[in-house]
Amino acid sequence: MEDHIRYDSDSHVLDLLDQRLLPTQESRVLCQSTADIVTALKDMVVRGAPAIGVTAAWGCVLALREVRQEPLWRAALEDRLERIASARPTAVNLRWAVERMRRLWTARAEADPDTLLSLWLEEAAAMQAEDIAACKALGRFGAERIRPGDTIMTHCNAGALATAGYGTALGVIRAAWENGKNIRVIANETRPFLQGARLTAYELHKNGIPVTVACDNACALLMRRGMVQCVVVGADRIAANGDTANKIGTCGVALLAREHGIPFYVAAPLSTIDRSIASGADIPIEERPAREVTHVGDTRICPDGVPVFNFAFDVTPAALITGIVTEQGVLEPPYSQSIPDAFARAGR
């Protein structure tokens, strides 16, 4: 499933699998402008931190194509890059990807638009390939922590759809399955957007990996009955101390895992670690439209006029995390030391 983000260099269109319609309909959204990219990000046509980053990189290419004939193209491009970078606040990969493209521009400040476009096309393609390689590497490291026959709980979707093609949490699960460990997966439904029920179950079922969907509020019962041996989740941003922002409800799963003596792992590439922030207290938490909670499809399930909370993410404290699975290995506490060590090994 490495074709859900496709850039056509002939038509200069970014072709995205519309994740809002899965699993019942496989439809594509074609992006040809900055506005298209911003809409696709905000409306969750594409979601998942690494996938958001790759989409943003291709969005920079489209932005440059929009403005390259303008006399003041540099200022116009800066404006569009900021619009892309600000589309969603929590996933660090979004701004990370835009800044990586911007640094390449800064290094070649004298480049004309056509030269810069050629450079950015190569860079966006490289970022997409790098993400797939990183996910496969972290999958191999994480699979070493999975025992044969384990049932693994995951929350939200951190699979191929959330990355450039292999997955973070599901990358660990895929690698364990490929190693013949005969695992099973419990996918929490992940209200209100139902990424677990719609997307994680879709991916795993399509790949022949045994998966059962559970209501979010069934976690305690399943753990108490000994039906969960390990939890693996993804991340949208990890602070320098290891505090991790992931889909709303993740912190509750981590608390329950600690109570029941179950290891809790976060799987994410180094690009999801934001060393510029000290702790999870500094991670912005996105609030999404109330309609995601008040309606299921077109059916209202909440009384008209009643307000709702719809925070898209929460922060799991580092103290609840057994290990952070990266392409540089499984990082262990204290994360204030193991995180910089991992970046040093990666030469960053």
Image (spheres, rainbow, N blue to C red):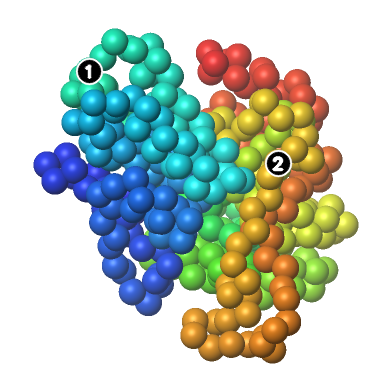
Local crowd size for mark 2, using a 10 Å CA cut-off: few (<14), some (14–19), many (≥20):
many
Whether residue 2 is visible to the viewer of this picture, yes or no, is no
Task: Name the residue beneath numbered marker 1.
Answer: 112
| The C terminus lies in quadrant | top right
Name the residue type under label 1.
Asp
Number of on-image labels: 2
Residue for point 60% across, 14% down: 344
Q: CA distance from mark 1 to mark 2?
A: 37 Å
**Could you tell me residue 269's position as x and y percent?**
54, 35
In which image quadrant can residue 183 be found?
bottom right
Residue for point 69% across, 60% down: 311
Q: The residue tagged with tag 1: helix, strand or loop?
A: loop
**Could you tell me residue 305's position as x and y percent?**
70, 84
Is residue 213 positioned above or below 162 on the image?
A: below
- Pick the residue in front: 154 or 156: 156
- Pick the residue in front: 143 or 153: 153
In which image quadrant can residue 141 be found?
top right
Residue for point 47% across, 27% down: 99
Local crowd size for mark 1, using a 10 Å CA cut-off: few (<14), some (14–19), many (≥20):
few
Name the residue type under label 2.
Ile
Task: Name the residue beneath numbered marker 2.
Answer: 283
Is residue 226 positioned above or below 268 on the image?
A: below
- Pick the residue in front: 341 or 57: 57
**Could you tell me residue 230's position as x and y percent?**
69, 54
Q: The residue tagged with tag 2: helix, strand or loop?
A: loop
Is residue 294 positioned above or below 338 on the image?
A: below
Is residue 331 positioned above or below 260 on the image?
A: above
271 vs 52, left or right, is: right
**Could you tell me residue 2's position as x and y percent?**
32, 48
263 vs 59, left or right, is: right
Q: Earlier in the sequence, mark 1 or mark 2?
A: 1
As drawn, the label of residue 191 is none
